[in-house]
């Protein structure tokens, strides 16, 4: 059974805080099954966006896992905002989580824990 979006995000934020980072929910989506987008703020002002991976990436043995793809990497914040506005027009139930962290792990590794 897949963990709800709100529980997944709570666990993600706890992990980010434990690693010395900061995070917040920018937008709440559907409680049970909303897609989760993670907006990563870098200290130099650039941003990275992690988005749900396409269905073709999912493992048949673990269909309930949340898998993310790197959608945008180290771009100006307005590019991330523009993409998220387009996503909201397509699906109004998405969650947007913002994080800022300086851990040695990649952001995808944080999400896979």
Image (cartoon, rainbow, N blue to C red):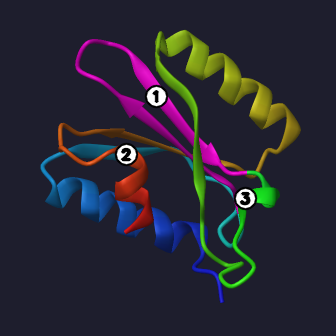
Residue 50 lies in magenta, yes or no?
yes
Disc assigned to residue 48: 1
Residue 106 place in picture, x, y as percent:
33, 45
Report crowding for label 3: few under 14, some 14 to 19, many 20 or more residues within 10 A (C-alpha). Answer: few
Residue 26 lies in magenta, yes or no?
no
The span picked out in magenta is 34-53
Residue 66 place in picture, x, y as percent:
60, 66
Query: Outermost residue toward the bottom?
Result: 1
Q: Mainly helix, strand or loop, the magenta region?
A: strand
- Which residue is pictured at 57% across the width and 21% down the height? 80
- The local secondary structure at tag 1 comes to strand
Label 2, label 1: how far apart the Cα atoms are:
9 Å
* Badge 3 vs badge 2, beta-carbon distance below 8 Å: no
Q: Quadrant of the N terminus?
A: bottom right
Query: Would residue 69 appear left or right of 40 to someone viewing this image?
Result: right
Query: Residue under circle 3?
Result: 57
Label 3, label 2: how far apart the Cα atoms are:
18 Å
Query: Outermost residue toward the right?
Result: 90
Sequence-earlier tag: 2 or 1: 1
Residue 43 place in picture, x, y as percent:
23, 20
- Which residue is pictured at 43% across the width and 58% down the height? 111
Q: In front: 67, or 82?
A: 67
Residue 89 place in picture, x, y as percent:
84, 32
Query: Would residue 45 appear left or right of 2 to someone viewing this image?
Result: left
* Badge 2 vs badge 1, beta-carbon distance below 8 Å: yes
Query: Residue under circle 2?
Result: 107
């Amino acid at each position: 059974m897949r963990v709800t979006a709100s529980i997944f995000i709570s666990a993600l934020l706890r992990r980010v805080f434990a690693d010395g980072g900061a995070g917040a929910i920018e937008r709440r989506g559907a409680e049970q099954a909303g897609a989760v987008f993670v907006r990563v703020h870098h200290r130099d002002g650039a941003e990275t966006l992690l988005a749900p991976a396409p269905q073709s990436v999912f493992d048949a043995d673990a269909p309930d896992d949340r898998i993310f793809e790197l959608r945008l990497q180290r771009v100006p914040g307005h590019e991330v905002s523009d993409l998220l506005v387009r996503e909201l027009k397509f699906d109004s139930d998405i969650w947007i989580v913002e994080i800022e962290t300086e851990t040695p792990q990649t952001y995808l590794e944080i999400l896979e824990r």
